[in-house]
Image (cartoon, grey):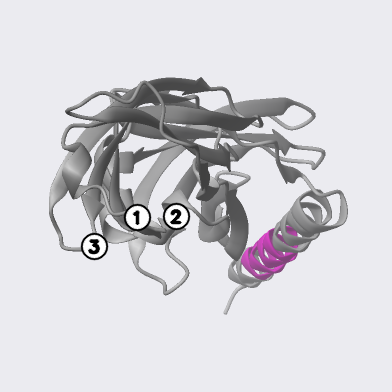
Amino acid sequence: MNHEVKQSIRALGWAITLSMLLTFAFLVTSIYSMVQTILEDQGISIGEVRSDVSNGLLTLSIPLTVNNTGYYDISNFNVTLVLKKPDGTVISSGGTLLPVIRYGSTAVSWSNLTIDLRELLSEMEYLLFNDSEFKLDMLFSFRYAYAISFQVDAVNMTIPWGAPLYNFSLTGIGAPYNITLTGFLIDVYFGFENHSPFTVEGTLSLKFYNDADEYLGSGTEAINVPPGYRFTGSVTVEIENLSKYTGSGYIEVSFESPVLGFLELGVVEYG
C-alpha cells in the first residue's frame, strides 16, 4: 500500500471520528437543551381555562405557552387534548399545531374542546345538581433542532365542573289565597346556586298532584341567574279544582332552557 493511500485512509478515519464526535456533541447538547427548556425551565405552561356557551355547546379554550430558552428551534409542536369523564370515557378531544418556535422566542396557542351540554347532562344528570370534575390528558409531540423527536404527556389533570342548579330544592309552600268556588292560587318557593360558567336562563314549570295521583294545576316562572349567583323565588300555581286539594301529594318539576333544553328535574312530595 503506497503512502498516498495510507494518508487517504488515515484522513477518512479522522473525518469519520470527527463526524461521530460532532454528532455525539450535537445529540448531547440537543437533549440537554431540551431537558433544560421543557423540564427545568418549565418551558411548557398551561394558562387558565376559559369557557363559552352558544347553541347548547360549551367550548373550553385552553391557552398554552411554549418558552423556548434552548439552543435550537422547536418544530411541529403538536398538542392533543382529551377530556374524559371520571370513569375514563372520552367526552371530547381536540388539538393544535405550532409549526416553528425559534430559539429564544415564546409562542402562545389556544386549544379548544367542544362539549354538547344537552347530551352530556342527559347521560350524567347528577351534573345538574352536583359539582364534580373531569380529567384532561394533554399530549405534546415535537421535533427539537429539526432532528430529534420527543413526546411529553401530562395525564389525568383536573378540570372542575360547576353545577348550574347546585342544591336545587323546594323550600316551602305558601298558604292558599284568592280562593274561589272553583280553585285558588298557591306559591311554591325554591332556590339554587349557579356554580356553572354560563347563565341559567329559562322557564321553571311545576305540575301539582294530590295523594290520589289526580292532577290539580300548574304554574311557570321565568328565571335568569348569572354564574356565581344564588337564586331564591317562587312559582305561582293555580289549583283548578278546589275539591280535589287534600293538602298532600307531589309536584313534578321541569325546566326548559335555550342552553340546556328541556329537563325533567324530578318529583317532590308535599304535605
Region of the chain picked out in magenta, as a range: 11-24
Instruction: Please name which of the two marks, 3 or 1, marks the residue nearer to the observer.
Output: 3
Residue under circle 3?
211
- Of the pair 240 and 24, the residue shown nearer to us: 240
Give the mark nearer the N terminus: 2 vs 1: 1
Callout 2 crowding tier (Cα within 10 Å): few <14, some 14–19, many ≥20: some
Q: Residue at x 56, y 41 (%)?
A: 192
Callout 3 crowding tier (Cα within 10 Å): few <14, some 14–19, many ≥20: some
Q: Is residue 61 left or right of residue 241?
A: right
Residue 24 is labelled as: none
Residue under circle 2?
127
Distance from label 2 to label 1 (Cα)? 14 Å
The three-letter amino acid code for the residue at tag 1 is Ile
- Label 2: state its secondary structure: helix
Distance from label 2 to label 3 (Cα)? 30 Å
Residue under circle 1?
91
- Label 1: state its secondary structure: strand
Instruction: Please name which of the two marks, 2 or 1, marks the residue nearer to the observer.
Output: 2
Estimate the x, y position of residue 198 in percent, counting from the top left: 50, 28
Q: Is residue 18 magenta?
A: yes
